[in-house]
Image: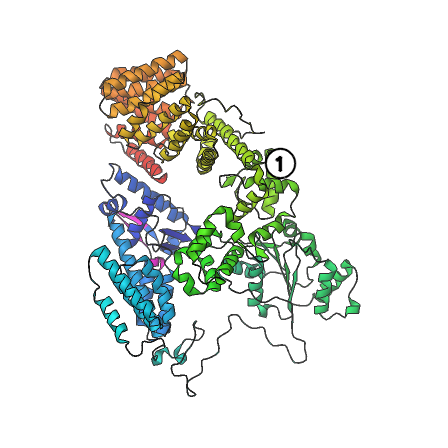
Amino acid sequence: MEFRLLGTVSVETLTGPLPLGPAKRRSLLAALLLSANTPVSLGRLTECLWDDEPPSQARGVIQGHVSRLRALLAGADAEAYGVELATLGDAYVLRAPETLLDSQRFEELLMLAREQRGPMDAVLMFKEALSLWQGPALSGAFAGPPLRVAAHSLEESRLATVEELSRAYGALGEHHRAAALLTAETAAHPLRESLAAELMLALFRAGRQSEALDRFHRTRRLLADELGIDPGHDLADAYALILRGAPGTTGAAPPKSAESSPAAVPPGAEGPSRVAGGGPDAAAPAPPRPPFPAAPPSPAGEPPPVDLLPRAPRGFHGRAAELAALSRSAAGEAPVCLVTGPAGVGKTALALQWAHRNPALFPDGRLFADLRGFSAAGEPSLIDVLREFLLTLGVSPRRVPESVPAAAALFRSLTARRRLLVVLDNARDSATVRTLLPGGADCVTLVTSRHRLEGLIASDAARPVPLDTLETDDGTALLAGVLGEERVLAEPVAARRLSELCGGLPLALRVTAARLAGRPRWTLAALAGELADERGRLAYLDVDDTGVAAALRLTVQHLPPGAVHQLARLGHHPGGHYDPYAAAALAGTDPVTARAALEQLAAAHLVTETAPGRWVLHDLVRLYARSLDPASAREALIGVLDHCIATALAAADTAEPGGEPCFVLPEDFRRPSAVQDFADRAEAMRWLATEREDLALTALAAREAGLDDRAWRIILLQWPQMVWRVRDSWSPLLELALEAARAEKDAYAESRVLTLLGWVLTEEGRTAEAAALLERSPVLAREAGDPLGEATALVNLAVVQAELGELPTALENCARAVELTRGEDDRHTEMLTLQHLARMHLTAHRPQEALDCARTALDLGPEHEEAARRSLLLAVCGEAQLALGNEEEGVRLLDRAAQEAERDGYDEGAVRALEALLRVSGRPEFRRRHDEALRRLAEEG
């Protein structure tokens, strides 16, 4: 277990980071970690979680976050690491060994670095300390004032460390490296004089005097323009030293102390060993230690072990987990290790890296064959592969059998008593691999493939080692391996952006690096800008005969036509995820056919199944797929838009049965071949929540394509989720719907969207904005001949008017809304209008009228429907009874309202009812349930 503050606030475990949830929970964790093993008061935590006046339920929210953190830590076996989150009176303390906290390890490494006598050792320590930083300190947390101060302090410590590392580089004479390091930091902190001074000296000592002087003048002007001050002592002293041309500071490294001489460098330490002077009496540097153990020498008289391996990959980075997995997989009897992944992900590089680093495991040699399973040149014949293997093993050309079965049998016989590694690269199917398996129990076969080769897993117990894309840091390291560390360090942000745009795909990263290496005047930022344009990204990622598109083309050409058609249509989906229903709508097929095609694409690593029945495309695969059939883009888009409308209609109808339909379908609506069924309300709401981001992207794509009639409908159909989680930032999406409705000049649509948007703004506390929108909504509804829409609009307008102190007008509008719904004989909407009228009577201190309205509304709807509304109506009844002096009945009704809300997951309703209960009753049970509901709300963000 590891706690991280130097970057995104997180808790890393053996199974990955803990799902901490909302920003305020990360803030709470950060505040506790910054004072690890020391109690932190509730007041201090409140300051950390809220920038201004905290809410009245601040204590409950904090308690909820603490409770959830405890549960997460317990689930990660925190006790085994000596971690405990304890309550001490009105404070909390997070007890943890300091070694588990990255900020503590950072400070320890700094202390050790400063104690080193030799600069080489200091450099290693400083670099290790800085490697703990994964981004700005305390990222991902809501930064209240105390946390902002702490983040600034940590950043100051990091910058001071960068300056110390640069001075250590200088002591080694590595002034160019110091300059590269400092250039990146001064770009981010141009007003930090100590950084600028160190950079000036590093440039000067690297023989770049004009750049050093230019840096001084630029910094001087910036200080004058931004702060109105002159350079301080650091800058002025550095400038004077450069002008004097102080001895020992002109390009060559200064003489090193005894501690930094080659004889004092620890064995195996990285970096070049240099000796000042370099005369005949100078000590010669020791030869570098080989990175992997060498194979034992062959006994006298025996031939050396056979070796067909290509050279080891250059610039290999990362993959520590996969290399370890290969070592574990190779430890059994006659193991077959299967490295699988998409085109360009680095399967061959991984296999060769592992094969080259473990020669001692295979004293009899290493065989290699490229099976060209996805090559334009076609696959080699099996007899040719076996002939090469047999000749390498010493078989006379005349003794090589002519048939594949006989040659395979001889190969198995010859390898039966040997310890060999057989690497079969780029295999397309299991049958080919089976023929080439060696016969020895001590042999290891390493297979790479773009297909999952599940048949090989079933028949030969092959042990899969799936290969995913590189993390951003490993991607930037790969770029640095080709371009040089200085060029990448000079533009760290652009380097990370390039890694992201390449999707962590090693092939794409190598092509990008090759383009930059051949163009030394290009900046990384300029190429990142070019790659940001999706229309030309694949073209930029091709160079000579190598590229992402070419690699994908070879994979696709081996797919059946149905899978290729499905892939081409997936490229036109504006969202990120697909299920069989969406895939079928895109391809114009049915879900069964679509699922089969998705399985074929997954077997070829062109799509990835992230959850049962839910797939994603890599960004570069998506761009390639889009190029397969560009003419079908609009047809595919309309298909998926209508799928979204049909499915969201089914979800809304299941989540809120009996509700009035939002609209009629578009005239040219194309109903999908099948629409997903939802078993109950929970499943429907879960679909709406899961698909929220993709629905938003789909609506945006509809708007950009001029399909406004689809755009506003897709957004409006999410109303059950908006009602359920009203404070969950819905207004931007509804504003998009409003633009679409107005573009269509559809009064009905505009009124419906305005009504919902006005209510959301009201709940967000933006009352004035809501009032301005809602004034227009009833008028539009009347123009459109939509009495039920007018009734809903009047209710939402009345809520705003009541908040603005216009209670009599609000009551009139609510009463008018009730009349409209009764005229339309719509119980669902009538229940809604009566609920709000009852609440307004209660606000106007008319408890009996409130009770009558609420009872009438409750009589309209069956008990299994309208979960949220029933809870709110029961709460009104309970509060009305309390106001009438019937305390026992009021408590009973409020308790029932809370129970129904808790049962259906309506936490806001539960909090409202329990707060009313706590005003008249101090029962511990009510307090406990209230705090639990608050905690659940906090978990939702």
> Quick check: 638 above or below 215?
above
> Quick check: 369 above or below 646?
below
Q: Split into 4 quadrants, where in the image is the N terminus?
A: bottom left
Q: Could you tell me if residue 904 is visible in this image? A: no
> Quick check: 132 above or below 254?
above
Q: Split into 4 quadrants, where in the image is the C terminus?
A: top left
Q: Does the stretch in magenta take in 100?
A: yes
Q: Does the stretch in magenta take in 636?
A: no
Q: Is residue 649 left or right of residue 253?
A: right
Q: Is residue 626 left or right of residue 61?
A: right
Give the image quarter of residue 843.
top left
Q: Which span is picked out in magenta?
A: 85-102
Q: Position of residue 743 (x, y in %)?
A: 42, 28
The one of 294 and 473 positioned closer to us in this rendering: 473
Q: Position of residue 896 (x, y in %)?
A: 34, 25
Tell me the amino acid under the disc marked 1. Answer: Thr
The one of 282 and 401 positioned closer to us in this rendering: 282
